[in-house]
Each structure stands twice: as C-alpha cells, then as structure tokens.
Image (cartoon, grey):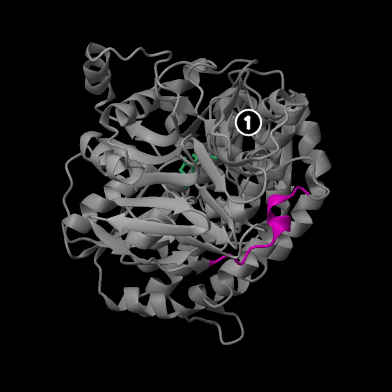
Amino acid sequence: MCGIFGFTGKQDAAPLLLKGLSRLEYRGYDSAGICVVNGNNNFYIGKAVGKVMELRNRTEGVDLAGYTTGIGHTRWATHGGVTTNNCHPHTSSDGRFAVVHNGIIENYSELRTMLQNEGYIFYGETDTEVAAKLFEHLFDEDDFETLKKLTTVIEGAYALVFIDRENPNRLFGAKLGSPLVIGIKGDSCYVSSDYRSLIGTVEEYITLEDGDIFCIENGDYRIVNCEVELVRDKESITEKEQAMELGDFPHFMLKEIHEQGEVLRNVFAGRVDFQEKTIRNNTLDEIVAQGFERIHIIASGTSYHAGYLGKQYLEHLADLPTEVTVSTEFKYGKQFIDRKTLYIFVSQSGETADSLESMKIVNERGGYTFGIVNVPGSSISRLAKSGLFTHAGVEVGVASTKAFTAQIATFLILALAFGQKKDLEYTRFLSILEDMEKIPDRIETLLKTSDRIREVAEKYARYPNFFYLGRSYELPIAMEGSLKLKELTYRHSEAYSSGELKHGSLALIDADFPSIIINGSSPLHGKNCSSVQEVKSRGGKMIGIIASNDQKKDIYDDYLTFEASLPETEVFSEVVILQLFAYHMANALGRDIDKPRNLAKSVTVE
Ligand code: F6R
C-alpha cells in the first residue's frame, strides 16, 4: 500500500533510494518516483509509471552527484489513476517542498476545494498533492512548526516525509496509522515504511508511533509527540542480507515455498518439546491459564484462511467454540466484546489496516487481544496484549506461502496447548505431537515431486474457471489454494465445501470447468468421493489432492499425492501442493509471479 523511503547524509541519495524502493516494491508497484536535492538548492524529480525498474531506467544517465538528500515512493493507487502526474513525490506550487505519503487523507476533497479557492492549481488527483499544497499554504518559515499545524488539519492515516529545497540536509515528517521507521548509521539517516528495506544497511532502527512528528538533519534527529520531545528505543536488525535476495531461485515465491520446512522447525522450536512430548512456552501457559471460554479470530485474505483452519483445530482439539470473521467486516459489524473471549488477530505483515482498526476496537472495549504475527515490531504485534510470532522470516513474494504454513502451525500448537489442559485425550495429543515433528521433512520430500505438479498445472492452464473443494480441515486449504490460483494466474476460482456444491453451483459444471478436491485421510473421505462422482457424472473434470495410499485413485482425471498421516497434519502437505500448482500454472501463463497485477503485499489502507 505504497512504500516510502528517504535518505539524508553525505552519499548520493538516488542509488540508495532506488535500492530502498525496490525492496519496498511489494507494497505497491504501479508507479514510482524520487525527488533529490543538492547543496545548491536544486531539486531533481524523476517519475515513472510501472515498476521501480522503469524509474531506474529513467534516471540512468542523469548526473545526480551531490544530491545527498531525497525521498522516494512506490505506489499502489488509491486516489487518482496510474499516471505520471499522480506519481509521488508531489510538490508545492512554489516548487520548494516535496512530499511522499502512504495512507489516505480522508478530508482531502474539502481541503482541495479550500486550496483551489485560495488560487492553488492542481496537476493531479491524489490526496497527497493536497498535503504538499496545504503545507505551502500553512508555511510560516519553520518546517517543523508547519508540520505540526498540518497534522491538526489533515484527517485519516498517513506516513508523510517531506524535503525542503531551502534546507537541503533535512528530512521531516509525521506518522499516524501508516508505518514508518528511522534508521541511522553514522552520518547516514534513512526513513522507510519497513525496517526490512534497511537490512544490511543499518544495524538498528526506531519505530515511530502514532502522533510522532520527526525531523532529521546532519546525522541528528528529534521526535515530538503531543508537544513532548521524546527518545524512542532502538531495535536491532537481526536478519541477514540474503533474506532479501533470490539466491538460485527464479522467483521469491518459489524460494519461500522451499523454505517452509525450515520455517516450521523455527515455529516449533521453543514451543513444542518433542523429547518430553509436551507444549512448553510461557506465553501459551499464560493464555491458557486465563480460562477463556470462546475464541474469536479476526484476519483477512490468507491469514483469514489460516484462522479458519485455526477454528477447526481449536474446536476439535480444545473444545473451544471459535468464530472467525474477516477483519474487513468485523469493524463495521455489531461487536459483542466480552472478557471470556480470546480475540486472536492473525497477520503476516502486522500492518493490515482492516485488522489493525478491528484490534483497536477490541482493545478499547476491554477485550483480550492476542496477535499471531510474522513481522516483529509491527503495529499489530505492538498493540496486542500478548501473542506469538510466526518466525517465517521475510516474505517478499506478494502471494503468501510460508507465512500461511507458519500461521497454521502456530494455531495447531495453540490448540494443543489448550487441549493439553482440557479434555484432549492424551493418546490423541501424543499422536498429533509425534506426527507434527515429521511435517518439515515431509514437506521437503514433497517438494521433490514439483515436476509432476508442474505437468498437471500446465495441462489445466487453459481453463478459465475452477472449483476448489474440501470439507472440515480441508475447506480452509481449498480456500487458500483457490486464492493462490486467482492472485497468481488471474484465473477465476471458487472454494466450496464439497458437500455444498449440489445446492446450486453444480449447475456450472461441464467439460470446461475443472474442479480440484482436497481429499486426504479424513473421516469425510467417503463423502468427498461422492462429491467427485456428482461432478464426474455431469461431465466435469476432477483433480484429486490425495494421500499416496488412497485406494480410489481411479475416480480422478488426475491426482497429486502426499504421504498419508493425520487429518490435522496432512493439511500442510496439501497446501504446499496447491501453492506449487498455482505457481507452475502462473509460470506457464507467463504471469508476474512475485508481483501479480493490481495487488500489494501490505494493505495499510481500509
Ligand atoms: C494473499 C495474501 C493476502 C494477505 C492479506 C492480509 O496471498 O497475502 O490475502 O493475507 O492481505 O495480510 P496480512 O496477513 O499481512 O494481514
């Protein structure tokens, strides 16, 4: 949802901005721009529709030596079309100030009208251009004081970073709702939407809080919140530069699919004691001891699907009634917040505005919030009363893969932790725990069958529509598989409970509408086989995602297999097959795998 990056120091800013922006590209990639300033108070502004690579091409050959301060932006359009005019940075009418913005200024339309009445002329349609003109309008010879005034006038969510041509060693800005960090190393100072863009560049960073206004100049910085001058704690960057690099893989998505075995070992470490055969973790002990009677899971997209599988685990293994709501609906629905319910917020980025806003409501109304989050220091992880990190590492591909498997593993651990203290039979607990330990190796073995998955994916690549079918534990896997197909291949797909198909949607089935059924060793295997027959007898094609010991392989047109285990753990293998299926089909169709059209990884607007 737009990435912003700024630099001020002794080095030339443009190459640093371009590197930072390419690392932030997952946040939006429909256009990109930079504005840099030199000691003679000259601005250079470069903008390009398309990816950061287009901007890089545009600036190549331009002599930007001595331009040592600058701001950059990579955009996911919210207000105004994808045009060069709407591309950030935006400038004041007098050309003195330039600004980049992530978020939405909700009262921009009133402000624009007011400024137009004052004689300001707009070249584009964005809310950010309003911020640039408004800054000029409010300017009273002091950047910092003007910024304070600006934040009292604009409404909405923002991370704003300005530069001033007359003060060419200065970056200044404000944060409310959208993320922003500051990283400093010697004379070099950076601001960014995501600390991970600074991996390998600085060792420490500061996360700005809502209401913070900052100014960075000549290696020094100040932060003010509500007129109070503050010193915020620094956090260390522990990730290595390789996390941001492809290595031998053609796409980040494939790299991240292959990391899933290792990721799951990290998720289990420190939580599951496979030697002593128990769940052991302070956070889990504390949460279980609270005596919650119900669970409510709130999340969006892939994280919602993980939550939906979490519901199956929590209900089946811990006897806890569990509701799951998409965060986009939670905020505007009627909320019944009570003290006996544990509110779990699931988010890879920890910044999804819909989830974050929903969490604030629960916090304000006294509910207990628990975060299952991948990014340390992110807003959701900070606002949650307690929580668990998913330890999936940096996920660069826009389509979530390893973050999902880490989320479902976390839910399995959580359910077992509750179950261990409740009525879960010890033998069942033990068999799941013993089987869990094998999941990482199983995934690594399964990845070796990628060629067979590719063959089937290529065979079906020409079909425009798909059903993804499953029941119980396998329905959320069908939902996740369907989402992967949509976002990567731009093919239409729908996920359904296999039992539900006969209640209307079966009418769509014909020889050109294939279905994929997730049908492992669950007690519903037989019922799923009946659904396969219903589809087949209407001329539909059926692909089975099935256990290798399945005795009914001949009912499918094609099938992809995994090692049989338990319904609670087979889901991991099933989802990996579906990730690869979508990946290979997208590859066959020549899609932009790591940056599918129209999307952004971190959705920081509502
Ligand atoms: C799909 C995907 C999205 C996210 C959703 C929520 O591959 O990644 O559906 O799951 O935008 O994002 P987070 O998990 O960051 O809250």
Ligand 1 within 8 A of label 1's CB? no
Q: Give the quadrant of the C terminus.
A: top left
x, y percentage for residue 416?
45, 71
Relative placement, left or right, of 560 versus 148 is: right
Query: Is 350 contained in the magenta span?
Result: no
Residue drawn 80% across and 50% down? 247
Asked whether the viewer can see residue 116, the reply is yes
Total numbered labels placed on residues in the image: 1
Q: Residues within 10 Å of mark 1 (few under 14, many from 20)?
A: many
Q: What residue sits 27% from the left and 44% below the top? A: 148
Task: Residue type at mark 1: give it.
Answer: Leu
Q: Does dot 1 land on a helix, a strand or a loop?
A: helix
Q: Is residue 180 above or below residue 291?
A: above
User: Foreground: 575 or 303?
Assistant: 303
Residue 72 in picture, x, y percent from top left: 55, 36
Where is residue 272, by image quadrant?
bottom right
Give the vertical position of 186 relative to 533 (above or below). Answer: below
Residue at point 37%, 28% (across, down): 132
Give the labeled residue for mark 1.
488
Task: Name which quarter of the figure residue 398 lies in.
Answer: top right
Q: Tell which of 117 and 414 is nearer to you.
A: 117
Q: x and y percent of residue 232 in the render?
A: 39, 65
Residue 522 seen in this snapshot: no
Q: Quadrant of residue 44?
A: top right
Q: Which residue, as the protein is rendered here, is positioned at the far front?
A: 40
Q: Residue 539, image x and y in percent?
A: 63, 18
Q: Which residues are magenta?
A: 236-246
In the picture as drawn, the residue positioned furthest to the bottom comes out as 276
